[in-house]
Image (spheres, rainbow, N blue to C red):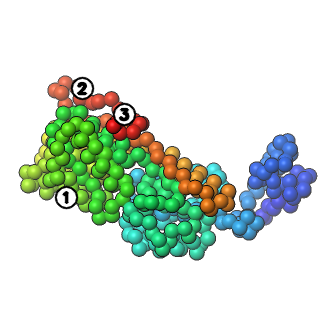
Amino acid sequence: MNVTIKDIAEQARVSYATVSRALNNKYGVDPETRRRVLSVAKELNYRPNAIARGLVSNRSFTLGLILPDVTNPYFPAVAAGIEAGAQERGYSVFLCNTNWDTRRETNYIKLLSERRVDGIIHAPVGNTLNEETEGLLPTVYVSNAPKNARQSSVIIDNIRGGYLATKHLIDCGYESVGFVGVSEHETMANNDRLEGYKTAFRRYGKEIKQDYIKFGDFRQETGYKIIQTMIADRSYPQAIFAENDVLAIGILHGIKDMGLRVPDDIALIGFDDISFSAYQEIQLSTISQPKERMGRLAVDLLIDEIESGDAKAAPRRVILEPELIVRKSSCRSTGSDEELLPRTEAGGSVPG
C-alpha cells in the first residue's frame, strides 16, 4: 500500500500542510513537530510521489548530465560527485554520452529539454557556444567551458596545471620537453594546458621545438601511435607532458613496446590523476583535479539557480586549483633508491 501525506498527518496528529512543510524542510514548523513527522514518515516507510511533487512545484527534480566520453575514468569520477550531490538535494540525474560528437551533443540538449529536466550539467565537446541550444535550459559547464560562455561553470586552472607539469619536467633536468594534446575538438582546457606548457618554457628562457608538439584526439591509442612514430623516426624529446592521463598511458605503453624505459629514456607526466595512474605498473606523475568536488559544486550552482528562479542572475565562474602528483614516471633514478622528486605543488597562479 502506498503511504500518503494523509496517513502521516493522521498518525502524527497534525495537518496535511504541516506534514508537507516538515517533509520539505520549510519554515514554520516547530522543531519537535518536525521530528515527530519525520519519525512517523520513516516508520511508515513513506516515499514521496515524484509526479505529484513535480505538479505542485512545476519541476521534474531531474538534471541532465552530458559527458563526452564515459570510457575515460576522469568523467565517471566527476559524475560520481554530481550524482551524490544531486541525491542529497532531492534530484535524480539523466546521463547522456556524446562520444565527442557535436551532433549528438545538440540532439541530447534538445531531448533533455523535451523531457523537461530542470537543468543540465554539461562537459562540452568543443570550444564554441552552441547558439542552437544555448539558453534552452539552465546550464552549468563542468571541466570545460566554451569561449564567451553565458552560463556558470566549474573548471580547473588549466594554465596553472600545464605550467606545473612542464616546470616539473624541466626541474628534473630535461632539456627537451614535448607536448601531446588534442586538436580535433579544440577546447579551452586544451588551449590553456598548452599555454601553461609554453609559459613554463618562457619562464625558463627555453626555446620551444615545434617538432615535439603533437596533436590527435583524447584516446589511449592516439598516444600510443604518436610516440611510436616519434621513436621510429628517432625524433623524440627526453620528456613528454601529455594533456590527459589516458593519452599518457597510451604513450607509456608505446614507449615500452618500442624497447625503451620510462623515465630513463623518456620521462612522462599526465593530467587528471585518474585511478589507473597510481597502479604499481604505471606509477604516472600527473596533475590532479578535485573531480568529485568539481561535480558537487556544479550541482550546487545549478540547483541554486533553478530554485532561485532567477534566470537572469550573473553567471558564476569557479576555478579550482590543480595539484602536482609526483610518481615514478617523471624523474630518472639517481642510482640509489631515492628518486629526484621535487616537492608537490598546488594552488596559486602562474608566476609573472
User: Which residue position holds label 3?
Assistant: 345
- Report the residue at 14% width, 53% height from top: 211
Quadrant position of the C terminus in the picture: top left
Q: In the image, 67: left or right of 53?
A: left
Q: Position of residue 14 (x, y in %)?
A: 90, 53
| Residue 70 visible, this angle | no
- Report the residue at 74% width, 69% height from top: 55
C-alpha span from label 1 to label 3: 31 Å
**Image height of 30 relative to 128, above or below:** above
Judged by depth in the image, the label closer to the viewer, 1 or 3, is 3
Q: Position of residue 62 (x, y in %)?
A: 61, 63
User: Which residue position holds label 1?
Assistant: 225
Q: As shown in the figure, which amino acid type bears the numbered disc 1? A: Lys
Whether the residues at callouts 1 and 2 have beta carbons within 8 Å, the answer is no
Q: Position of residue 220 (x, y in %)?
A: 28, 56
Q: In the image, 91: left or right of 199?
A: right
Q: Nearer the viewer, residue 104 or 177?
A: 177
Q: As shown in the figure, which amino acid type bears the numbered disc 3? A: Glu
Q: Check disc 1 and report its element: helix, strand or loop.
A: helix
- Report the residue at 36% width, 42% height from top: 160
Q: Check disc 3 and report its element: helix, strand or loop.
A: loop
Q: Position of residue 216 (x, y in %)?
A: 25, 60
First in residue order: circle 1 vs circle 3: 1
Snapshot quadrant of residue 269: top left
Q: In the image, 83: left or right of 306?
A: left
